[in-house]
Image: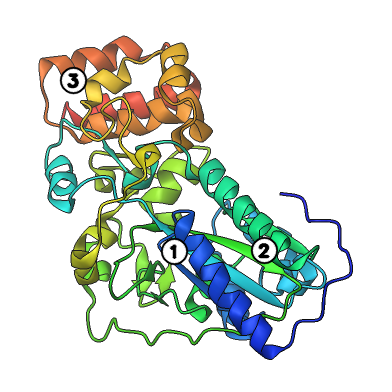
């Protein structure tokens, strides 16, 4: 999203800035954001954590995590002149957690991370942030700003934590004491010296439920996730072959993973989203693996139009479902579906199909 051409801002004293901050939060609420906070730009602790994580190679093939150097942790380098950051959250939970657990417990049904069941959140939130930025401009005149929704090197969770939206849990997701963790984050970097909110205390305590439930044990220690083992990384970010040793652990998860959120006790406070765009499309919250495996590329593109799922492409979609079918119960329809695909797709898909067939011979 482009920055507004800067003009001569009217002088804003401390009381005026404090009032503007309150107005921003009210406008954001009117635009459908569930919470808004304001953070400064000092992210030294988060930068140290990021550097240590990268040094261990935990980012896997996600080269973009280190490509931009210190721009990710130093906002003024990414957007010169930045003095404060407006951080917002938008709840997306599309269905009660018990329904999601039921899908995970049914090996014939495909599990798709609940954030991806509806329309892609990026465009919706960018549009809302632009409207918020416009309201600020109407109130004070031209100013520097730039809005982000998972679209640039931004440490969104660390920023949200400093803005008081929650704390980063042991699974590395942001948790809000009264809303759980089923929400998206967005930011507006601005040259306005807005007063910062206070960070929220960490309330994970002695709980290690997320570490214990992780199907691939990707949370190698509290607050440390080895993405190379994470189901979300394996099914979304990884372009090549899924490591054989990890395939049985994926179960029926074909796009992302929510286990650590489903088990988190703070999510008993999570509320269902009121956004229609986040509701499940094409019954993707309860589709059978065999039905999705039968989608040709044209069907895949049509059914995932406007969805975050489309980014993995049809071949990785088939790769992931082949693994899930390899983990399913041995039935004639499963064997027939895998046999039909054997040797017909790309080398990537065929390798995973052959692996899946081998699982049903053991």
Point 58% across, 73% down: residue: 50
Q: How crowded is mark 2: few (under 14 residues within 10 Å), some or many (20 or more)?
A: some
Q: Dividing the image into 4 quarters, which one contains the C terminus?
A: top left
Query: Is residue 252 visible in this depiction of the protein?
Result: yes
In the visual, does 320 lie left or right of 155?
A: left
Disc 3/disc 2 C-alpha distance (Å): 56 Å
Residue 218 against residue 109 in the figure, above or below: below
Mark identifier at residue 136: 2
Q: Horizontal and vertical percent for residue 238?
A: 50, 43
Compared to residue 6, the image places residue 222 above or below, namely below
Which residue is depicted at the point 41% across and 69% down? 172
Q: Which residue is drawn at 45% across and 50% down?
A: 233
Q: Tag 3's secondary structure?
A: helix
Does residue 73 appear to the left or right of 49 in the view shown?
right
Which mark is on residue 226? 1
Circle 1: element type: loop
The one of 361 and 97 positioned closer to us in this rendering: 97
Crowdedness near tag 3: few (<14), some (14–19) or many (≥20) residues, C-alpha within 10 Å? many
In this view of the protein, can residue 56 be seen by the observer?
Answer: no
Q: Which of marks 3 and 2 is nearer the N terminus?
A: 2
How far across and how far down the image is residue 228, in percent? Answer: 46, 56
Q: Find residue 111 and name its label.
A: none
Identify the secondary structure beneath mark 2: helix
Mark 1 or 3 closer to N-term?
1
Mark 1 and mark 3: Cα distance apart in space: 32 Å
The picture places residue 253, in percent across and down from the top left corner, at 28, 41
Which residue of the protein is positioned furthest toward the right in this rendering? Answer: 8
Q: Which mark is residue 334?
A: 3
């Amino acid at each position: 999203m482009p920055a507004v051409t800067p003009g001569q801002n009217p002088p804003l004293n401390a009381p005026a800035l404090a009032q503007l901050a309150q107005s921003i939060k009210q406008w954001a609420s009117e635009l459908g954001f569930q919470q808004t906070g304001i953070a400064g730009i000092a992210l030294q602790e988060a930068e140290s954590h990021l550097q240590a994580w990268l040094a261990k190679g935990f980012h896997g093939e996600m080269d973009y995590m280190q490509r931009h150097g210190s721009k990710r942790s130093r906002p003024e380098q990414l957007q010169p002149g930045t003095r404060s950051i407006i951080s917002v959250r938008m709840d997306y939970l599309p269905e009660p957690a018990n329904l999601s657990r039921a899908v995970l417990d049914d090996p014939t049904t495909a599990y798709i991370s609940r954030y991806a069941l509806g329309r892609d959140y990026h465009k919706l939130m960018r549009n809302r942030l632009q409207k918020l930025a416009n309201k600020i401009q109407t109130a004070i005149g031209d100013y520097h700003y730039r809005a982000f929704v998972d679209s640039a090197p931004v440490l969104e969770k660390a920023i949200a934590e400093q803005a008081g939206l929650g704390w980063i849990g042991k699974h590395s997701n942001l948790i809000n004491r009264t809303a759980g963790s089923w929400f998206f984050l967005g930011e507006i970097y601005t040259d306005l010296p807005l007063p910062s909110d206070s960070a929220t205390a960490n309330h994970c305590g002695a709980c290690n439920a997320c570490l214990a439930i992780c199907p691939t044990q990707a949370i190698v220690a509290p607050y440390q996730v080895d993405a190379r083992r994470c189901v979300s990384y394996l099914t979304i970010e990884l372009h090549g072959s899924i490591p054989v040793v990890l395939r049985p652990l994926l179960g029926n998860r074909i796009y992302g993973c929510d286990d650590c959120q489903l088990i988190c006790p703070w999510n008993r406070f999570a509320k269902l989203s009121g956004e229609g765009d986040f509701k499940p499309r094409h019954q993707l919250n309860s589709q059978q693996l065999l039905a999705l495996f039968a989608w040709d590329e044209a069907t895949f593109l049509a059914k995932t139009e406007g969805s975050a799922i489309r980014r993995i492409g049809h071949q990785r979609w088939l790769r992931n479902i082949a693994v899930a079918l390899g983990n399913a119960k041995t039935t004639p329809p499963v064997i027939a579906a895998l046999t039909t695909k054997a040797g017909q797709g790309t080398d990537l898909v065929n390798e995973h199909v052959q692996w899946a067939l081998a699982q049903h011979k053991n």
